[in-house]
Image (cartoon, grey):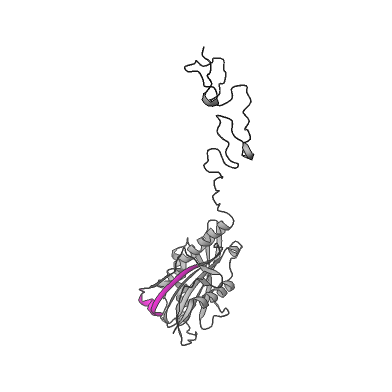
Amino acid sequence: MSYPQPGPYGQPPQPPQGGAPNPYAQGAAAPGQPGYGYPPATPQPGPYGAPPQAPYGQPPAPPYGQQPGMPGPYPPPVPPRKGGAGKTVAIVLGALVLVGAIVGGAVVFLGKGKDGGGSGTVADDGKKYKLTTPETVAGEYQKDAAAPAATTKESVDAKLRSYVDNMEKVSASYKVGAGMKQLKFSGVYGEIKDPEGLVDAWFAQAKENSEKQPGKGRLEGSPQKVSPGGLDDAVMKCQVAKTNFGTKTMDVPLCVWADHSTAATVVPVDGAALMGSQGMSIDDAATLTAKVRHDVRVEVK
């Protein structure tokens, strides 16, 4: 019968070569593990205050907070959940997309009514303006880098030319902070013969779009003429678009202004107001749109 031989340099004894297993060793442990009936080995403190060392033959315990088998000394990051502010931002974006589907085509295809269909009551100050997309509008809205602005010349049909000559189109998206408040701005500039007629045609086209796309939303009531502070020589009208996002029904206002050089629509969405029963009011939307107009309109010398 062979006996375990001491290992070199003080290592633990080596098992005998070719030795038969002990038939009486019930529940024999894996190499390095205590046998049946023995208490588990207790980690020994390391030198100089180091973390306890695992007994010989056992894998070291993972650092605090780390799951066994996971790489790295720290627990894996927890993916963000679609709740709270993140859920509200998603709803804000959804509302902008839905309402944008209603008013987007109005920029290119407006002008369905009769030529010069407006009242023509907007004064002309004799100056020429163009629309720009500054980095900040209305004091706190920053241009959204994920939705870059686009300024392009458009090929338009004869009906639109009845309202705008030498037209160019401008659009940009803006948000506050992480996106709880956002707005979409889309406009044209050139020589506008009948500003109020253009506004009326814009809403008429938006209504037609909403009827063709009932799943996107619908316009409620009729456009309301508004006169927020700072509007000056322009006409502005606003209307509410009612949209459905998931199980939630939302009221989103949209406003359109026009003067003798510029015309644009602004769709603002306030996440905090949207979570309520009514969303942003027409008056608040009109005030915000007037501020946007002030910031995006630049005189052409």
Where does residue 299 sit, x and y in percent of width and height? 46, 82
Q: Residue at x 36, y 75 (%)?
A: 157
Q: Is residue 223 visible?
A: no
Magenta-highlighted residues? 153-173
> Which residue, as the protein is rendered here, is positioned at the far front?
9
- Is 228 located above or below residue 253 in the figure? below
> Which residue, as the protein is rendered here, is positioned at the far bottom?
126
Task: Say how many tags the image has.
Answer: 0
Where does residue 271 sit, x and y in percent of width and height? 57, 63
- Is 60 located above or below residue 185 in the figure? above
Looking at this view, is 67 or 158 the one in front?
Answer: 67
- Is 40 located above or below residue 245 in the figure? above
Residue 248, by quadrant, is: bottom right
Residue 118 lies in the magenta-colored region:
no
Judge from the rendering whether residue 260 lies leftward or rightward of residue 227; answer left or right.
left
Looking at this view, is 24 or 245 the one in front?
Answer: 24
Residue 154 lies in the magenta-colored region:
yes
Looking at this view, is 46 or 129 the one in front?
Answer: 46
Looking at this view, is 130 or 30 the one in front?
Answer: 30
Judge from the rendering whether residue 157 lies leftward or rightward of residue 208; answer left or right.
left
Where does residue 177 sit, x and y in percent of width and height? 56, 64
- On the rendered image, what quadrant is the C terminus found in? bottom left
Q: Is residue 269 visible?
A: yes
Where does residue 133 sit, x and y in percent of width and height? 47, 72
Judge from the rendering whether residue 149 lies leftward or rightward of residue 247; answer left or right.
left
